[in-house]
Amino acid sequence: MLLSKNQIGLFSVVAVLLAVVYADVFQGLYYDWSNDENYSHGFLVPVISAYFAWQVRDQLLNDLIKPMNSGLLLVAFALLVLFAGVSAQVDFALRTSFVFLLCGMVLFLFGWQWFKTLSLPLGFLFFMIPLPYIVYDSLAFPLKLFVAKFSVIILKLMGVIVLREGNIIMFPETVLEVADACSGLRSLMSLLALGVALAFFTQDKPVWRVVLILLTVPIAILTNMLRVIGTGYLAQYYGAAAAEGFFHEFAGMGVFLLAMVLLFISSGVLRKVSS
C-alpha cells in the first residue's frame, strides 16, 4: 500500500526531529567508529541495514498500514532510556535508545506488518553500537586466558620452550602478552555483524542461518589463536620484534581476512548441505 502525502510528511518531520535530538549521539558513534578498531565495522552497519530494507521494499508496499498506539509504549521506553543515558552519561543507553525509538515509531506510524517486515534491518542496527567497556572487558579477559592457554599447548607441541602465567606468555628471550586484540573478541564483533548479514544473504532456512552465525565465534577464536601461535613461534627467533611494528599490524589484518575466508567457505558448505 502506498503512503499518503500526510504520512510521508509526518515521517519526514519525525526524521528531522530524530536527526536534531540525536546529533550528539551520531557524532559520538562516528568518533568511536573512526578511532576504535573494535567497531570500525560500524560504518557499514547502517548501509547493510538500508540494503536489508531495500530488499523488502516490494513487501512493504503490499503490507497493510495500520498504525498502532501501542507503539507509543516503545517510544516512551526509548525516551526513558534516553533520559537515563543523559542523566548517567552512559553512551550505550543513549545509542540503544535511538534504535528502540525507531522501532517504536515504525510500529506507531505504520503498524505491526511493517514492523515485522523491517525487524531485520532495525535489529541489525544494534551492531553499530559499541558495548560498554565493563561488558567488553568481562568478555575479553576469559577469552585472553583461553587463547593463551591453548596457544601455549600448541607451541609446546611444536617444540617451543614457553611458560604461561595467566595471559602472559614467557619465552627464553622475551615475554609476550595476549592483549585484547589477540583475544578474538575484536574480530568477533566485526565478524558477528558480517556473519548475520551473510547468513541472511546466502541461507534460505532459519536453522542454517543460526548455524552460520554461531560459527563466527569459533572462527574468530581459532584465527586469533593462530595469530598468537605464529607470533610465539617467531618470538623464539626474533624476540619481542615479532609482536611489534609491521608484523603485528600485518598479522592483525591477515587474521581477519582469514576469518572472513573461513566464514565464506562455511556459508558455501552450508548452502550445499541445505540444497
Image: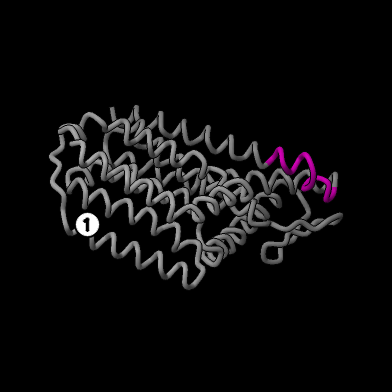
Tally the marks. Answer: 1
Q: Specify whether 132 is left or right of 180.
A: left
Q: Quick one: 89 or 170, which is closer to the camera? A: 89
Above or below for 228 versus 44: below
Q: Specify whether 11 is left or right of 220.
A: left
Q: Position of residue 82 (x, y in %)?
A: 40, 64
What residue type is disc 1 on? Gly
Query: Is residue 169 a member of the stretch shown in magenta?
Result: no
Query: Is residue 249 a member of the stretch shown in magenta?
Result: yes
Q: Position of residue 201 (x, y in %)?
A: 36, 32
Q: Position of residue 20 (x, y in %)?
A: 44, 52
Q: Quick one: 94 or 45, which is closer to the camera? A: 94
Q: Residue at x 51, y 64 (%)?
A: 135
Residue at the bottom extreme of this rendering: 88
The quadrant in which the N terminus is found is top left
Q: Specify whether 123 is left or right of 42.
A: left
Q: Residue at x 72, y 62 (%)?
A: 168
Q: Residue at x 74, y 49 (%)?
A: 232
Residue carrying label 1: 71
Label 1 residue SS: helix
Span highlighted in magenta in the image: 239-251
